[in-house]
Image (cartoon, coloured by chain):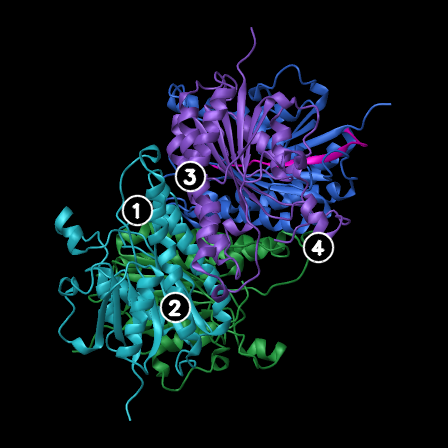
Chain colours: A green, B blue, C purple, D cyan
C-alpha cells in the first residue's frame, strides 16, 4: 500500500526562487505550479529531469480567485485523494525607480494585487484543505503556508510607496493568519529575503556574480523546506535571509 | 494687509478625533472637511461656534480620486489664494470579529481602500500643493501630512487579517513618503493610537468612561497640532499615543 | 500665596541638548543639573541670563547611586517643599570606530554604566518622589521621566557592539517602566534622536552646518517639553526625531 | 586519514534546551559544555549514552573572562588540532515577579552579566578561533555563533526592568556582531524563544504538559542545528520560535 500523495502549491513561479523551492520539495511532494505565464513557461524553469513530469501540474493563474478556483478544481481532478499540505506565495513585482508623483493609483492597486490580494485568495483556498488534514505524524502540522517577504516588508524606502504598501500588507496577512491558524494546527511563516537573488534574469542584467554577493536560489529554498519540517512545539513565524556579505 | 489664509484638509471626518483635530487647528487654519457623510453630518461634529462657519468647507468624499479632485477644485474656488499646508488622513473602519474563512476578498478590498488607497489619493493631491509653498518661516515646513495609525498598524492580531493589511500598508505609505518628501521640506508623520477613543459612538455602545480608561479626542488632537508645529531640524515620523492606564 | 516650586532633574548635562532642555523647561521649573563635570562646567552651558541663578542647582554626578543620593539630599535641602516632577536621562558616550576584537570587556561595562545603570539609578530616586506627587491638574501626571535614545537604540550597527548594547538596554528600561508606572500616573517616554546635533563640539570638529543638515538642540528640546505637557489620556512612549534632510 | 574533529561550545548548560542542543550537535561535533554547576551537574543533563564520553568536555564557567579563558585553555589541551566552529550562548535567569522599586542596582547588574557580558566574553574568545578556520566546504561558514533570546528581547514587560535590559542588550550584541563578522564568514544568529520550555524544572513546578502547550527542547534544538547548516548566501540573523497554540 502506497503512502498518500502530498501536494505543494506554489503561486508566483518563475525561473528563480520558486523553481528551487519546487525542486527542494519534489522528493516529498507533487507540485501544483501557478503563475501568469504557466504552463507555457514551464521549460524555462529548468526543473531537473529527476522530477517525474507526472508529479507536476503547471497551470496559469494571475492570483485572482477565479483563476485559483479553476486551478484547484483541476488539482482535485488530477490527484483526487492527495493531501495538500504546503502553500507558498512567492509573487513579486519589479521595482521601478520612480517618484511618488510620477506614479498613479493604478501602480498602487497593482502592487496590492500582487502584494496581498493574491495571497489572500490563495490562503482562502488552501486553509480549508489544510484544516481537513490530520496532523502530520512527524511535525504535528496540518499544513504549512509560506509567504515570501523582502527588505521592503519592514522598511518602506523612498521609492517604494506602492511596493512597500503591498509587502507590508502581505506581512500583516501572514502574521494575522499565524495567530488565527497556529492553534488550529497550521504553520504560517514569513520569509524576509534581504539581498539580490542570483536568477537568470539578474545574471542577464548584471552579469555573473563574480564576488559571491548574490543569494543562491537553492540555498534560500532550504529554509523553506526547513519551515515545512519544523515541529509544532517550535514553529517560526518570521525569519530573515541574507548573504554573509550583505550590508544591512 | 492680512496674512495668507492657511488651509488644513482632513479626510475621514466624524464626530470624534477628526472633529477635535479640526477644532485644534481652527485658530490658525481654515478647514476642508471631507467624509462620505459630509456635508450632511456637519452638525453632528459639534464644532464650537467660535469657529466662523466661513472658515469651514465641508464636502463629501469617499477617498476616491474623482471625489477628491472635485473637492480640491471646490477648495480652490472657495479660497483661491490660500496656502494649503496641512493634511490629515483619519479614515478608519469598524472592526468585525470574524474568522478569516468567514471573510471575503471584498472585505480585504474594502480595508485596502480605506487603509491605503484613499491615503494615496489624498497625498497625490496635497503634495504638489505643499511643494508649491515656500517654507514656513517658523517651522521651515512646506506642509505637514499626518496619517492616523492604530495598534494593528504594528501588530496583526488574529481577527485582523483585512484591517491590519490596510493599516500596515498605510504605515508603509507614510514611511516611504517621509523618506521621499522630507528632504523636499514636507513633514510626514504617522500617529499610532493605542487605546479606545471616548467618542459619542463609544459612549453610546459602552456607556460613560467612568474609570478614565479612554482616550480623550481633544488630548489626542494636541499631538497632531504639535506635529504641525515641529521645526524642520527635529521632525517626528512616528509616535504612539495611549492612556496612562493602558495595558500594552 | 505663591505656587509650589517645580523641579526638573537632568542627568548628563553638557553644552548641547541638555542645556536646551534646561532652557526650555526653565519658565516652569527650577533645575537640578547633573553631570561629571558640573558644577565647574556650568558657564560652558551658556544658559541665558533670563534664568535666575537661584533656580539652578548644578552638582556633580557620574550616575552612581552614591553620587545621585548626595545630589538628591542637596536638592531636598535647597528646595525642601518643591515638587520634583520631571527627570531627563541624557547621558551619552562618544562613538569609537573600533572593531569588536579591538574592544575589551571594559568598553562594554562602560557603555552599560552610561547606557542603563545610571538611568536605573536616576529612576530609582525619581520615581518615589513622583509617586508622592498629586496628579497635575492640567496633565494628570505625577511626573515625567524622559530618556534620550539614538538610532543605535533600534539598530545595532557593525561598530556599535558596546554602545548599542547600552542603548538597547536603556530602551528596555524605559519601556518596562512605562508599562509599570503609567497606570500609577507617571509618564515615561523614550526619544530617539536620529541625526547629528549641532553642538559646539560638533561645530568645532566639523565646522558650521552650512547645509542645514544638523539638528538644532533648541528644536529637539521642544519635543521634550511637549512630552512633559501631554495629558494622561494620550501619552507618547516613543517618538523619533530627525532632520528633514536625513537619509534613514 | 580521519576528518578534523569539530567542536561546539555551549555556555549556560542545564538540563533543558542546552542539553538538547548538545545532543543534536553531537553527531558532528565534540562538545565543550560550560555552566556554573558543571562538571558536577553533568549527570543531570541526561545526555544519551550514544554520545561517547570522550567527546564531552564539561567545565565550570560563570561567564567571566577568567573562567572562560581557563576553559578554552583546557579545550586546546584536550583537542589541540580541532576546529572550533560553533558557539551557543544560552544563559538565562529566573524571572522574579517584583516591582521596580523593590529591585536594586544589583538585580540590574546581575541581569547584565548574564544577559550580555558573558555573551561578550564568549564571543571574544570564539571569534578569533572562527576567523582562523577555513570556510566550511558545504556551508561556506568559518563558524556559527548563536544567541538564545526570548520574548523579553523584543518587548520589555512591566516586571522585566532588569531582565529585559540584559536581553535587549544581548540582541544588540548579536545584531552588531552579525553585521561586523558576516562579511568575514561568520554566521551570527539570534533565536527568540516565545513560550515555556518543557524542562524537568518546569515539569516539577507545573506538572506534566498535558495540553501540549509547552515547547519541546529537542524540537527547539533542531532550529539551532539548522542555523549551523545554513549556507552562506542565505543566512538567518533572527528567527522566532513558539508553539502552535501560543497566544502572542
Total number of numbered labels? 4
Evaluate whether label 4 is on the same chain as label 3: no
The Cα atoms of the two marked residues, 4 and 3, are separated by 50 Å
- Between residue B152 and residue B53, name the one nearer to us: B152
Q: Secondary structure at mark 3?
A: helix
- Disc sitting over residue D125 in the figure: 2
Disc number lying in front (1 or 2): 2
- Between residue D212 and residue C85, name the one nearer to us: C85
Q: Chain of mark 2?
A: D
The part of the chain drawn in magenta is B79-94
Evaluate whether label 4 is on the same chain as label 2: no
Question: Percent position (x, y) of residue C244?
Answer: 68, 46
In the rendered image, the vertical position of residue A89 relative to residue B23, given as above or below: below
In the rendered image, the vertical position of residue C45 relative to residue D238, given as above or below: above
Q: Chain of mark 3?
A: C
The Cα atoms of the two marked residues, 4 and 2, are separated by 53 Å
Question: Percent position (x, y) of residue A72?
Answer: 37, 65
In the rendered image, the vertical position of residue D41 relative to residue B239, given as above or below: below
Question: Percent position (x, y) of residue C55?
Answer: 60, 22
Evaluate whether label 2 is on the same chain as label 3: no
Check disc 4 and report the residue beneath it. Answer: A102
Disc number lying in front (4 or 2): 2
Q: Secondary structure at mark 1?
A: loop
Please tell me how crowded label 4 is: few (under 14), some (14-19), or many (20+) other residues with Cα within 10 Å: few
- Disc sitting over residue D247 in the figure: 1
In percent of the image, x 76 and y 48: which residue is there? C208
Disc number lying in front (4 or 1): 1
Amino acid at each position: 500500500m502506497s503512502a498518500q500523495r502530498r501536494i505543494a502549491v506554489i503561486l508566483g513561479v518563475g525561473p528563480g526562487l520558486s523553481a528551487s523551492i519546487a525542486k527542494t520539495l519534489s522528493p516529498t511532494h507533487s507540485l501544483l505550479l501557478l503563475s501568469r505565464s504557466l504552463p507555457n513557461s514551464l521549460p524555462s524553469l529548468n526543473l531537473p529531469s529527476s522530477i517525474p513530469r507526472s508529479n507536476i501540474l503547471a497551470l496559469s493563474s494571475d492570483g485572482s480567485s477565479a483563476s485559483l478556483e479553476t486551478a484547484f478544481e483541476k488539482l482535485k481532478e488530477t490527484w483526487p485523494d492527495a493531501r495538500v499540505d504546503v502553500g507558498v506565495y512567492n509573487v513579486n513585482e519589479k521595482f521601478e525607480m520612480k517618484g511618488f508623483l510620477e506614479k498613479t493609483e493604478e501602480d498602487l492597486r497593482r502592487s496590492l494585487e500582487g502584494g496581498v490580494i493574491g495571497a489572500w485568495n490563495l490562503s482562502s483556498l488552501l486553509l480549508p484543505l489544510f484544516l481537513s488534514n490530520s496532523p502530520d505524524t512527524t511535525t504535528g502540522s496540518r499544513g504549512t503556508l509560506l509567504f515570501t517577504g523582502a527588505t521592503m516588508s519592514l522598511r518602506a524606502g523612498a521609492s517604494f510607496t506602492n511596493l512597500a504598501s503591498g509587502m507590508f500588507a502581505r506581512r500583516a496577512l501572514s502574521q494575522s493568519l499565524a495567530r488565527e491558524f497556529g492553534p488550529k494546527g497550521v504553520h504560517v511563516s514569513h520569509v524576509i529575503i534581504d539581498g539580490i537573488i542570483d536568477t537568470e534574469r539578474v545574471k542577464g542584467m548584471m552579469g555573473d556574480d563574480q564576488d559571491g554577493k548574490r543569494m543562491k536560489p537553492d540555498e534560500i529554498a532550504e529554509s523553506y523546506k526547513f519551515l515545512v519540517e519544523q515541529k509544532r512545539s517550535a514553529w517560526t513565524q518570521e525569519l530573515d535571509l541574507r548573504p554573509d556579505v550583505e550590508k544591512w
